[in-house]
Image (cartoon, helix red, strand yellow):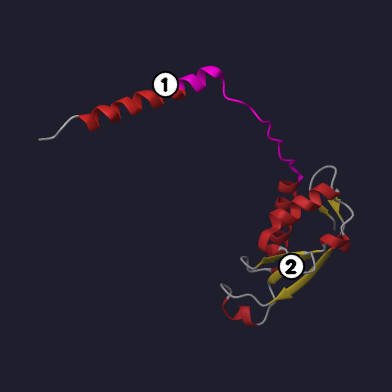
Amino acid sequence: MPLIVSEQIEIPDEEFEWKFVRSSGPGGQNVNKVSSAVQLRFLLPRNTSLPGAVRGRLRRLAGQKLVDDGSILIAARRERSQEQNRRAALERLAELIRAALIEPKVRKKTRPTRASMERRIESKKRRAGTKRSRASSSWD
C-alpha cells in the first residue's frame, strides 16, 4: 500500500523498510511477547517519487532522524498495537514530507524609507539630549 502524501505525490512501498521491535511502556505482560514498536526507514537515496529540491529540504528538516546511509528513521512506540504504530510512523513521515514540499519564500532586500531614517535619527538626538542634561546637573 503506497503512502499518499498529496494528490501529485505517492511513495511506493519499495522505498520503505520496516522493523518491528519490543516496546517499553503500557501493555502489561503483553509487552514481553509482542513486537509492537515500529521502526520505519524511508530510503531517501533510492527515492524517485520526490523532486530533487524536495529531497534536499527533507534532508535538512529530518535533523536527527537522518541516519548515516542517507535514509530517514522514524520510530513509533506510543500505541499498544503494531498496526497503530505503523500508521503513526507513516503519518509522521507524511507530515515531514508535506513540510518539505513547501518552498521557502525568497527574501527580497528592502531599504528603510527616508522618513523612517529621519525619525530614527531624531529619536536618537532626543535621547542623547536627555542624557546630556542629566550629566550636567549636580546631585549635591
Q: Magenta segment: does it hold 62?
A: no
Question: Above or below — where is 119 with respect to 46?
Answer: above
The answer to which of 96 and 86 lies nearer the viewer is: 96
According to the picture, the residue beneath numbered tag 1 turns out to be: 122
Q: In this image, 99 relative to 125: left or right?
A: right
Going by the image, does 96 lie left or right of 14? left
Q: Amino acid at mark 2?
A: Val
Q: Closer to the camera: disc 2 or disc 1?
A: 1
Q: Position of residue 43 (x, y in %)?
A: 82, 63
Q: Nearer the viewer, residue 89 or 45?
A: 45
User: In percent of the image, x 70 and y 51: which residue is there?
Assistant: 95
Secondary element under disc 2, as helix, strand or loop, is loop
* Residue 112 drawn above or below residue 40: above
Residue 89 falls in image quadrant: bottom right
Residue at position x 46%, y 24% in the image: 120
Percent across and percent down for residue 54 are 80, 48
Q: Quadrant of residue 15?
A: bottom right
The magenta stretch is: 101-119
Badge 2 density bin: few <14, some 14–19, many ≥20, Cα 10 Å = few
The location of residue 40, given as percent across then percent down, is: 75, 66
Q: Is residue 116 magenta?
A: yes
How many marks can you see?
A: 2
Quadrant (top left/top right/bottom left/bottom right) for the N terminus: bottom right
Q: Quadrant of the C terminus?
A: top left
Is residue 92 visible in the rendered image? The answer is no
Which of the pair 14/120 is nearer the observer? 120
Which mark is on residue 135?
none
Amino acid carrying label 1: it is Glu
Which residue does the numbered mark 2 point to in the structure image?
Answer: 67
